[in-house]
Image: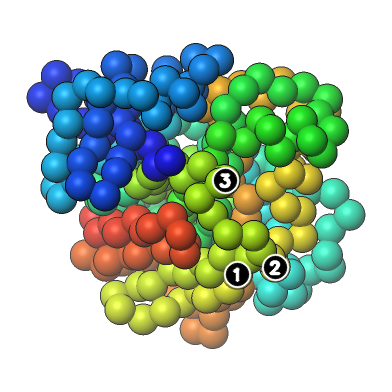
Amino acid sequence: MRLATIRTAAGTRAVRVDATGATETGDADLRALLSRPDWAEHAAAAAGPSHAVDGLDYAPLVPSPEKIICVGLNYRDHVLEMGNELPEYPTVFAKYAPALVGAYDEIELPTVSEQVDYEAELAVVIGRPVRHADEAAARAAIAGYTILNDVSVRDYQNRTKQFLQGKTFEHSTPLGPVLVTPDELPEGGWAISSTLDGEVMQSSTTDQLVFGAVDLVVYLSAILTLNPGDVIATGTPGGVGHARRPPRYLTDGAELVTAIAGIGECRNVCRLAK
């Protein structure tokens, strides 16, 4: 299945997205849908109002997750381009919900920095509460996968050893457009890319991940309970703007496309904050 949160005249609605239509499930958003123990069966049987797929107004896939947990330095090629050694443990930081925007919304560039970078990422969405997971429990807890771009304000990020301040600027982080359940995706790595104004900046596959999705659920669930709707951003491949010589940053009016094979794409225009 493919699931999404869309904006309607009556507010946000969770929908099942099929080839020709998006059918409302009766839930306000994806987090509310995933909070149902029977969410998969409920969504599959949904027969609410339907919307044409063309022109859907996608909200952030999970508009207000309890947690957005991010993992840094998790692609082999990116670790090497940043001059680091492969990590023994995941590098973990966080974002807050006000950072999120929809898959086709504008990305807000802050006025306090000219070093705003792009980071294409596969994101994991949790579908059931999980704590102290083994591999089987971790796999079962994954509702599906989506796309996130961890837009990063590099000068703020690098002010200290803690990443958070450069990672959670408001209205900066596309999430969506859809959640794709694991049964719809092939085994192995999926192509992941970012394209800036028509030029491919990042091109890799998710089998370059140092710590995969299941590994991360196992690791993070040892720290705290992961709940339905929680988002785990799994890290970015090589090719980020900050590592280029000269650096390549996001600018007002630039179009950023973040794509993962089998899931789709986010397509966002960057606009300087007013």
Cα separation between marks 1 and 2: 6 Å
Local packing at callout 2 (Cα closer than 10 Å; few below 14, some 14-19, many 20+) is some
Residue designated by label 1? 205
Callout 1–callout 3 Cβ contact below 8 Å: no
Amino acid type at circle 2 is Gln
Amino acid type at circle 3 is Pro
Find residue 39 and report its horizontal and vertical position in percent.
48, 21
Earlier residue among tags 3 and 2: 3
Amino acid type at circle 1 is Thr
- Residue at the image point whose x is 35% and y is 73% from the top: 196
Colour scheme of the picture: rainbow
Front-most of residues 191 and 85: 191
Residue designated by label 2? 208
Callout 1–callout 2 Cβ contact below 8 Å: yes
Is residue 164 something one can see in this rendering?
A: no
Quarter that holds the C terminus: top left
- Residue at the image point whose x is 27% and y is 67% from the top: 254
Find residue 110 and report its horizontal and vertical position in percent.
35, 49
The local secondary structure at tag 2 comes to helix
Find residue 192 and report its horizontal and vertical position in percent.
51, 67
The local secondary structure at tag 3 comes to helix
Residue designated by label 3? 182
Q: Residue furthest front?
A: 45
